[in-house]
Image (cartoon, rainbow, N blue to C red):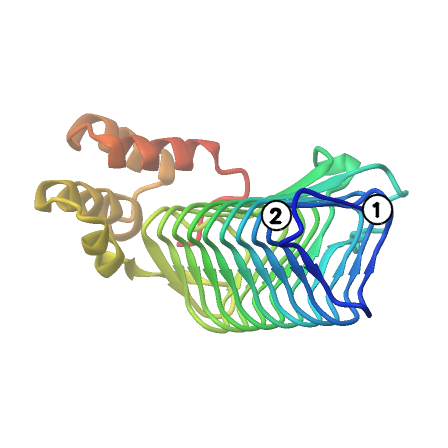
Amino acid sequence: MTSKNTDTLIHPTAIVEKGAQLGAGVKVGPYSVIGSKVVIGDRTEIQSHVVISGRVKLGSENLISSFASIGSRPQDLKFKGEDSELIIGERNMFREYCNVSLGTEGGGGKTVVGNENLFMVYTHIAHDCVVGNRVIAANNVALAGHVVIDDGAVLGGLSGVHQFCRVGTLAMIAAGAKVVQDVVPYGMVHGDRARMNGLNVVGLRRLGISNSDLQVIKSMYHLVFDSNLTLDDALEKIRGEVRDCEFRAKWLDFLKSSERGICR
């Protein structure tokens, strides 16, 4: 184990394997285990009974709460022990019993988590997921493999996202929802086989969106979800009738790239 600074505090009962790299001010609590390929950024706090294993890179100022498992072996029968990794940014909170898996060869070899996210108790982030920034996942949220969660999304407690699905920027998933197709940016979905239930107007207002840009999003929502048009026809009308702006571009890019179809 190497450490930058004597400010690093390791409890006598913790196990930090040779090769692990700990930044300045890192705290490792009782009975935690840090593997030999783990890199932990400055001022990250590892509470008691945490296991961090595999090739894991943690940024600075993260909080890993008790009994979390970070960098665990993927729950994928195709995984054959390849040297995959987990990359986590800064200022994230992983609460008790969170589980985050390494990537697999079939998903590019890495799982990625951004910055300033909150993962509440029993959150599961499976292999090859990509999670953006400022995401909130409430208790017992489960992300299957290869899921993409864009910035600012909120996932309600006990909700689940099917493998290869994408949840767009500032989207909201209701508690208990089962998401089996993509959720458009700023959309809200609920229910078993989640269906669209409006726009996250409150989140957009908090973002500081102008009334004119909000009207653009509402117009696109109407064309896609309220007009009985096919998705291709709705996209054509958006291109021809809706004012061009960053929100239109984001929607068009999202809809064109969707592989599983969208929740409607």
Foreground label between 2 and 1: 2
Left or right, 124 with reference to 155: right
Image x and y of residue 43, in percent: 56, 53
Q: Is residue 113 depicted above or below 108 in this figure?
A: below
Q: Residue furthest right?
A: 80
Which image quarter: residue 26? bottom right
Q: Which residue is located at x 48 percent, y 47 percent?
A: 115
The total of numbered circles placed on residues is: 2
Q: Which residue is located at x 24 percent, y 33 percent?
A: 238
Image x and y of residue 10, in percent: 73, 61
Left or right, 178 with reference to 219: right
Using the image as rendered, state which of residue 35 and residue 152 is in the foreground.
35
Mark 2 and mark 1: span between their CA atoms? 18 Å
Q: Earlier in the sequence, mark 2 or mark 1?
A: 2
Residue 114 seen by the camera: yes
Using the image as rendered, state which of residue 199 and residue 235 is in the foreground.
199
Quick check: marks 2 and 1 in contact, CB under 8 Å? no
Crowdedness of circle 1 by 10 Å Cα count: few (<14), some, many (20+)?
some
Q: What amino acid type should be assigned to the residue bearing mark 1?
A: Ser
Q: Quadrant of the C terminus?
A: bottom left
Using the image as rendered, state which of residue 53 and residue 260 is in the foreground.
53
Q: Which mark is residue 24?
A: 2
Q: Which residue is located at x 36 percent, y 46 percent?
A: 185
**Residue holding disc 1:** 36
Q: What amino acid type should be assigned to the residue bearing mark 2?
A: Ala
